[in-house]
Amino acid sequence: TATQYLSDWRPFPFEILETRLEFRLDPNATRVRSQIDFRRLEQGDLVLDGVGLKTLSLAINGQALDLSLIREAEGKLIVPAVSLPDSFTFEAEVQIDPEANTALEGLYLSGGIFCTQCEAEGFRHITWYPDRPDVMAPFTVTVHSDMPVLLSNGNPVSVESGKAVWQDPWKKPAYLFALVAGDLRAIPDSFTTMSGKHVDLNVWVRPGDEPRAGYAMESLIRSMKWDEEAYGREYDLDVFNIVAVDDFNMGAMENKGLNIFNSKLVLATAETATDGDYERIEGVIGHEYFHNWTGNRITCRDWFQLCLKEGLTVFRDQQFTSDMRSAAVKRIHDVQTLRARQFREDAGPLSHPPRPDHYQEINNFYTATVYEKGAEVIGMLKRLIGDDQYRKALDLYFDRHDGQACTIEDWIKVFEDATCRDLTQFKRWYTDAGTPRLSMTEKWADGALTLDFAQHTAATPGQPDKPARVIPVALGLIGPNGDEVLPTTVLEMTEGQQSFRFDGLGARPVVSLLRGFSAPVTVAREVTADEQALLLAHDTDPYARWQAGHDLALDGLIARSNGDEGGAEFIRAIGGVLDDAEADPAFAALCLALPGDEEIATTIAASGTVPDPDAIHAARRALTLDIAKAHSDALSRLYDAMAPRGPYQPNADGSGRRSLRLACLAYLSRLDNAGRAAALFAEAENMTERQGALEQLIAAGRDQQALAAFEAEFRDNRLVMDKWFMVQPLRAASDQAVARATELAKRADFDWKNPNRFRALIAGLTSNHAGFHAADGSGYDFLADWLMRLDPVNPQTTARTCSAFETITRYDAGRQAKAKAALQRIAAMPGLSRNTSEMVTRILA
Ligand code: DPP
Ligand code: ZN
């Protein structure tokens, strides 16, 4: 398979003045006519992309073209430069089969709704086109169909029965094209922009789903207002449409003026969606809306630059959620996600820089590194230059690059010009893979504290040497009595080793290190359990406080998994957290939650030891029980105190109280055999508590009745039934998880061609650490069997799911051999997709 290299990028030799498309929709035989006005910029052939098209005719300026110009195998149509005038109109008519499109790339049908997904390279499944993000054009789209609602990008020009014409005045690359046709109902609203422009807003759903779309609309309006206030960015069309569809490979897509969403990120009611679902809906509605400036108005020159739009847009949606909810809780959630997904990716065979320089299949690079680490890198920049300079740089970025397709170099240059800083070394964060390990040792003498820092980044695939990076180290000092003696200070580390000294201190303080998680690094430092407990009790930085408690728990868990004693200090320290819990329930809930098995395994592996999934799981269960016993009164009091006070509100306050209640329930269920959980399941009026209670019942092995009741109530609600499929393998005892998943997969309603349903079951199992890593290899075989089944149907979702195998080399030889055998079975499958083949090859390398 051909590898694509960043260094091979060449400009497209033509510009497009206008693209006109005409669709005659039919489930099996949709006709697409295109007229593309090209103008030559430099010498070169006209190379167009097309995959799986039945080409009916091709013409240039009305002259028919020979179909032998099509190179079927490579998916290219090449018209030699000599046969082309400087300006010309290319015309094609092709036929495509949306119903047969199970890969969900290009134009497809989802529950009777015609919809599209073109990022990254889906447009080539619709018609012949230069399907690359640096070729931008205004589009005019005509749709013929008897469906009642016909939508495309931009503004409506004419909408009549059976035909609609849409015009998008803003030039855009083909990956932002969208078309929707179906029997849909709108939740309508409107927004007046800061310059007084009226915008019609619609969230389109299937008939009957209207009452579930209100929160999505509220989130959209909040997003539009926030982008004006925080970034000065105004919306630029007369309408903004969001459509929810059930079959979608990703979460959502930022098509210009016509966002298409996975229905799980639109539909919510208190009875059917959890607090986590609500928060994600708000965050992703924001994310896709923010792309209108960071992605659409300013796009990527090529797909190697994906993090230019994704890292920045994630950073913006994180800021938005912080402003809408609790900034401290959001930061801790983001750090947890980064560690669980990106650090894990960075420590294994799939490690790559935020800006990769080669790939086989770009769809395999919509990763935690491109998204979440891409966002962290921007957070570091902002921390180094300050809020005012950051805003100045962003204003310059929008001014300078509006309407362009850009690179990471363009982005860095904007910051250099706005701040007069040299960012050459900083750029390594974009080009180098791997998570730096920051170690710190302390010297204390005569009222002076000297901190010696060292950074080290282990080799990653293809990158043996790792020069030192710029690391912003935010820290504070806490005196022995708990008072802060140095407020947050940002040290800028640029060398492999560097020392910083703090003088004039009365007594030896405790270092509150990496406040706010100021850089995406792991930390190695000597710190005693007493010092961690002091930080947990007194640190002024909420992230650092949480981290201190989390590390204390982690140390205890690792000791226990090695068969030693451990966790006593954490059990003691948690008493203080419980005493203060009512002041900030969400924060207390985060402190109460023990590190997961996966994180414990990651930490053990990072220290060079082989993690034992069963021992880790047993250690975690034992510590949970000990905490429950030690604090049963406080836990039980808080559980009652956090009972609902009035109707459900999906806001920070309400969700904080519920998260604390469920954190207490997890402990109490170990003492009362899930008795409270059974009662809560029966009486809860919202899905957050309902699902939380169900999870405890499954863990306690007394779930039969609850599962049946849940199924009876929600049988017809796909999104809720996804939860039902997910929580069973997730919370089942580890020695039953694979059997449970196997049984569930046999059910008629395991509609595995639907990505949400497939992922629900599979992710439920692979997130059950000891269950998935069962020593007999049954988890690996189960996963491999399903990946082989899904690959011919939906390569994108198959390939992404392969990352469940990315950690195999950390385990013992027996598990490794079994996982390898499972991967080799996949690799040997005839006709394996390029997507999955690349993933399996990289993991096996
Ligand atoms: N839809 C995906 C996202 O918004 C890809 N652009 O991140
Ligand atoms: Zn995005």
Image (spheres, rainbow, N blue to C red):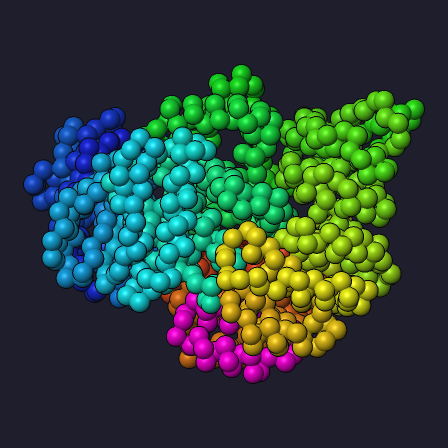
Q: 2 or 775: nearer the eye?
A: 775
**Residue 560: x %, y % from top left:** 82, 61
* Res. 64 visible in picture: yes
Q: Give, as a single range, the part of the protein colored magenta.
A: 699-728
Q: How many marks?
A: 0
Q: Residue at x 12, y 39 (%)?
A: 60
Whether residue 482 sits left or right of residue 76 in the image: it is right
Q: Quadrant of residue 387?
A: top right
**Residue 310: x %, y % from top left:** 46, 41
**Residue 61: x %, y % from top left:** 9, 37
Q: Does residue 535 sit above or below 711 in this rendering?
A: above
Whether residue 328 sits left or right of residue 293 in the image: it is right
Q: 203 or 756: nearer the eye?
A: 203
Q: Does residue 535 sit above or below 87 in this rendering?
A: below
Q: Residue at x 86, y 26 (%)?
A: 505
Determine the residue located farthest toward the right in the rendered image: 446
Determine the residue located farthest toward the left in the rendered image: 62
Determine the residue located farthest toward the front in the rendered image: 646
Q: Does residue 840 sit above or below 445 in this rendering?
A: below
Q: Residue at x 14, y 62 (%)?
A: 146
Whether residue 772 sits left or right of residue 559 in the image: it is left
* Res. 104 visible in picture: no
**Residue 96: x %, y % from top left:** 22, 58
Q: Is residue 655 magenta?
A: no
Q: Residue at x 30, y 64 (%)?
A: 206
Q: Main secondary structure of the magenta part?
A: helix
Q: Quadrant of residue 27?
A: bottom left
Q: Quadrant of residue 43?
A: top left
Q: 618 or 572: nearer the eye?
A: 572
